[in-house]
Image: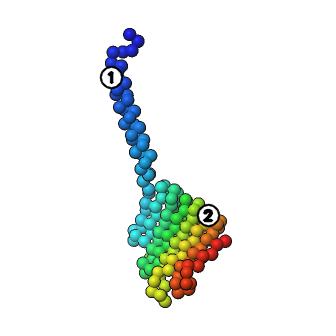
């Protein structure tokens, strides 16, 4: 005999193992990878992404990166999304009234979207400004964001515009 006597039993076990491995691979391919998350102690800054790397004063979030900074005192929310976000954190004391000041600078690349929500005292509603582009840099010290590449700004403020103002450049 060329084949051992228990050959068919071995093949059945091997087939069952291969089937189990195939099913596990399909399950892993169907379920998205779990995201990494960071929330500040006061809960006002949340960072999420597929991967988050922490250095002494830098946070590198990549793979559907998202930062949300909420200033509860002012009633504002800043949502920033991009393929990759590199944030430099401030050292020393952070202004508790302005939690976003904990982020000194940020560089966002790939599919950048900023959404800024702020109360409008005149209409007593929340205004929404959405900015999209290919790349952005942000400086808390300068209170300035520079967005480049296919830039689009939509300002939805009923006290200023009848319909949302759309600017492109």
Task: Name the quadrant containing residue 155.
Answer: bottom right
Identity of the residue drawn at 48% across and 55% down: 51
- Out of 33 and 90, give the one closest to the viewer: 33
Sooner in the amino-acid sequence: mark 1 or mark 2:
1
Residues at marks 1 and 2, CA–CA distance in whole angstroms: 58 Å
Q: Position of residue 167 (x, y in %)?
A: 63, 75
Identity of the residue drawn at 42% across and 43% down: 26
* Residue under pointer 1: 9
Callout 1: helix, strand or loop? helix
Is residue 92 visible in the rendered image? The answer is: no
Give residue 47's mark: none
Q: Position of residue 95 (x, y in %)?
A: 47, 77
Q: Name above or below for residue 149 compared with residue 72.
A: above
Within 10 Å of disc 2 (Cα), the crowding (few <14, some 14-19, many 20+) is some
Q: Residue furthest bottom?
A: 122
Q: Name above or below for residue 128 compared with residue 134.
A: below
Q: Residue furthest right?
A: 169
Callout 2: helix, strand or loop? strand
Identity of the residue drawn at 49% across and 66% down: 67
Give residue 134's mark: 2
- Out of 69 and 142, give the one closest to the viewer: 69
């Amino acid at each position: 005999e060329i084949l051992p006597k228990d050959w068919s039993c071995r093949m059945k076990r091997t087939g069952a193992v291969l089937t189990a491995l195939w099913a596990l691979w399909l399950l892993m391919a169907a379920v998205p990878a779990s995201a990494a998350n960071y929330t500040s102690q006061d809960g006002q800054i949340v960072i999420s992404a597929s991967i988050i790397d922490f250095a002494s004063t830098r946070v590198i979030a990549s793979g559907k990166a998202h930062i949300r900074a909420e200033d509860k005192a002012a009633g504002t929310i800043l949502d920033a999304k991009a393929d990759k976000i590199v944030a430099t954190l401030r050292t020393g004391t952070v202004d508790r009234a302005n939690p976003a000041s904990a982020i000194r600078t940020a560089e966002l690349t790939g599919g950048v979207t900023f959404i800024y929500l702020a109360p409008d005292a005149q209409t007593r509603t929340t205004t929404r400004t959405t900015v999209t582009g290919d790349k952005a840099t942000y400086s808390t010290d300068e209170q300035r964001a520079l967005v480049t590449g296919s830039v689009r700004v939509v300002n939805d403020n009923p006290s200023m515009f009848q319909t949302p103002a759309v600017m492109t450049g």
